[in-house]
Amino acid sequence: MQNGALRRVRELPVDTRRAMESITGRSLGEDDGVSINAYKLAGDDEDRDVAFQRLLARIDKTAKNVQDIREEDIDAAIDAATDRVRHQPE
């Protein structure tokens, strides 16, 4: 089942184009593209709170695993990763 669509504005029917302009809050040019995705929203507030608490627990666990690593080593790893991404050919 397809959950998303990408279309060129020039290929949209006029009423669809107007609807997309209403949703985006701006005029769409002929060379613009529009993308729409459909997905199930997260559960209610209680479900989000539970997920948030699980995320915080995971972050705390990760933080405990790295508390003995020196800040200089973390900075060096970040610098190396950044340098690699910046200079890696696409």
Image (cartoon, rainbow, N blue to C red):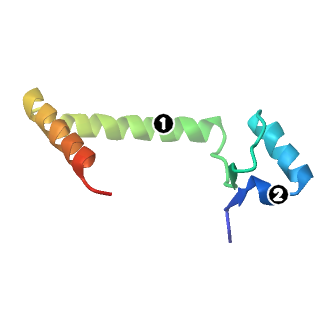
- Residue at the spot 77% in from the left edge and 33% down from the top edge: 25
Q: Is residue 45 left or right of residue 12?
A: left
User: Of the numbered discs in the image, which one, if any, rests on residue 52?
Assistant: 1
Few, some or many residues within 10 Å of mark 1 (<14, 14–19, 20+): few
Q: Tell me residue 44's x, y (percent).
A: 66, 40
- Residue at the spot 63% in from the left edge and 35% down from the top edge: 45
Which structural element holds mark 2?
Answer: loop
Few, some or many residues within 10 Å of mark 2 (<14, 14–19, 20+): some
Q: Amino acid at mark 1?
A: Phe
Q: Is residue 39 left or right of residue 58?
A: right
Q: State which quadrant residue 1 falls in.
A: bottom right
When the figure is inspected, residue 1 is found, relative to residue 14, above or below; the finding is below
User: What residue occupies the far front of the structure in this picture?
Assistant: 30
Residue tagged by mark 2? 12
When the figure is inspected, residue 63 is found, relative to residue 39, above or below; the finding is above
Q: State which quadrant residue 90 falls in.
A: bottom left
